[in-house]
Image: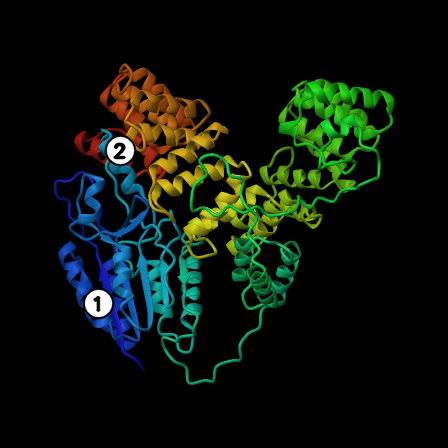
Amino acid sequence: MPGNRVALVIGIDHYARGSGPIFAPDLNNPVKDAQAMRDTLGKLGFAVVYGEDLGKDDFETALDRFEDRAKDADIAIVYFSGHGSTFEGLPYLVPADATFEELRQTERKLIRVEDVLERLREAKGVRIALFDACRDDEAEQALKQRMAGTKAVAQTRGLARVQAPPDGLIVMYAAQFLQTADDGTAGGDHSPFAAALLDKLPTPGENITAMLEDVARSVIDLTGGKQKPELVVDLFDKFQLVESTEPAPPPVAATDARIAEAALVWPSLASSNDAALLRAFKLHYAGTVFEEMASARLAELASNDVKEPAASQSSGETPGIQIALVPGVPGVVVTRVSTPLNACDSLAGALLDPDHVGPGIDKDKLVPANAIPACQEAAKNSPSTRRFLFQLGRAYNASKDYSTAISWYRKAADLGSTAAMGNIGFLYDYGDGVTQNSQEAAIWFRKAADLGNPVSIDNLGVLYEKGRGVEQDFQQAMTWYRRAADLQYPFAIYHVGSLYENGQGVATDYKQAMSWFMKAAALNDVAAMVEIGYLYEDGRGVPVNYQEAMTWYGKAANLGNAEAMSNLGSLYEKGRGVSRDYNQAMSWYRKAADLGNVSAMAEIGYFYDAGLAVGQDYQEALSWYRKAADLGNGYAMVKVGFFYDTGLAVGQDYTEAMSWYRKASDLGVPEAINNIGVLYEDGHGVQMDYLQAVTWFRRASDLGYSAAADNLRAICSSRKGLKGC
């Protein structure tokens, strides 16, 4: 086998207990997996640096030895099996001797994944990293709870992402972010990931990328779809780990399906000045003629020095975020007639009404006091003009006089207004002015849909997706969404992408989701822009790219989307794609909170709680937590409960703490369920009741909350024979 081949293989089964409260539990198979991997790679011509149950110092020594040997390697592989963990958004590997009490000790106790990859980068050729570890941040959350005075401890194999790797590096995780990686059973052979690797690695004549994709499929099959590996590839040359003696097949051309898909998206981008959107399209449809067309458009923009559409410069806009707007308006099929513009049209016309005349006005900008008299006059003078009747209903709708609104909508619907039919359906669906009745809503949406109204076609899809008024049916939802998407309705295009993203009615396909989101974003759909940001931030279907995520969140934020503003705050808080900047984070959180974003309100509470960007102020923290909690944020409910539990910034009141914990538990928040168990165990605010404590600890444990599992073990250990243990 040609070339200099070097590998680092480490497996850790046994973890130290020590005196620290946070520790990693033992695992079943990592050492056995590592031994088999060592033997397999040895047979494939690798010089293997091997270690098992290594502490931090020995782990570092093994890395040093590997780095020295890898400098001249044509191919270098790192394989690790054991616990992983995530702190402050950064991924770490857990050595066998790791015990720690505070977050600041993670750098000293753990091995940064980025440091491992830096050693791997010393190899001159192909570089592959394989991590068989879970990918959550439960350890970090448990540490924060511990520092805040709670009782729980955590166990995790959690591993986050690293930034997109440079050329020639392949990184494969046994599970997607926030998924559990199966360790295999005690006494079993191997973990599903190790078993698939050991089976596929010796395959002759298969390109390394295709082989690892086969590994991913095998893991999915072995786990019944519960575990899905993630593969990040930045290797553009074909490479075979085991060469074939057979001649290579000719290159495969882009499939007709991909070309057809690109052809649907390209018309909305052909004249775009949005370089970010064009770059994303070019990357997604590489290998097709449309890649060349996107390259030509980008070159044209560069040669003509065309700037991306500039963002409006609102006060406090963040430097370094290139915010660009997609030109054009949503591509809704509308009927435009050369009719004189009436004051009612200007004050209450709806862009999505096929009958509308003039530019229309967004519902949030409609002023009922001005629109109602103008439309009353228009309806009086032209009682058979259905758009005036609809617009009068819309004006009353904006004033929240729903009963009068639906009366005018019915009159317009009788004259064939599909917009009025759709709005009647909407009022029934939400119970505004009428008794809530989603079945009646479906009837009205279908009336409008049968007449070709894209909004109602899409709304029928929503009912099928959510199971409101009809039996839940994701395939029916997709059928209706695609019908509306064919009419170029942006929300429907976004909804098709969402079904692909979530695997509802179709197999999960992040690349398909990205295609649909890009098409919707080209039609100015803000929700699609946010989802593109999420895909880049999470590395789903594309390599992790925080700068691109920031760009797309910026686009949506500039169009007034509060969720995107909150997400920008999160990137600044975590230092993703930009230098960590708590002041900028707070600025974006405040903008989002001003628009009613509940998550941002909770984050502002956390900043005051922790003293980030502002002076530590528990009263102000509690105020923001309460705002978010009153609006249904489960995390904030737990924090309010914790303040009462500890007497922080408020008189200690266990009864009030219990009340807030119960509210959060009703939302399924595991931390709240665990904390109720703590109150029963300690007899705080309630009669001491160990059986109740066990019940609540078990509920939280069943939700995967490791702190509750530890509390359950502790109470059962200290009170032998306790029922429920």
| Position of residue 667 measured from the top left corner of the image (x, y, whole percent) | 43, 29
The C terminus: image quadrant: top left
- In what quadrant of the picture does the N terminus appear? bottom left
- Kindly indicate the quadrant of the structure image that contains residue 418: top right
**Which residue is rendered at x = 19% and y = 70% of the image?**
68
Image quadrant assignment for residue 113? bottom left
On the image, the x and y values in percent for residue 537 come to 43, 49
In the depicted view, which residue is nearer to us: 438 or 393?
393
* Quadrant housing residue 41: bottom left
Q: CA distance from mark 1 to mark 2?
A: 38 Å
Horizontal arrangement in the rendering, residue 447 relative to residue 645 (left or right) = right
Tag count in the figure?
Answer: 2
Residue 638, position as x, y percentages in the image: 35, 27
SS at badge 2 = helix
Q: Which residue is mark 2?
A: 145
Q: Position of residue 55 (x, y in %)?
A: 15, 55
**Residue 240 appears left or right of 21:** right
At 25% from the left and 40% from the top, the residue drawn is 154
Position above or below: 533 against 122: above
Three-letter residue code for mark 1: Glu
Residue that numbered label 1 is attached to: 67
Along the line of sight, the residue nearer the viewer: 176 or 376:
376
Q: Tag 2: residue type? A: Gln
Which of marks 2 and 1 precedes in the sequence? 1
Tags 1 and 2 touching, CB below 8 Å:
no
Helix, strand or loop status at disc 1: helix
Q: Nearer the viewer, residue 721 or 220?
A: 220
The local crowd at label 2, few if under 14, some if 14 to 19, many if 20 or more residues have their Cα within 10 Å, is some
What colour-coding does the image apply? rainbow
- Can the viewer see residue 413? no
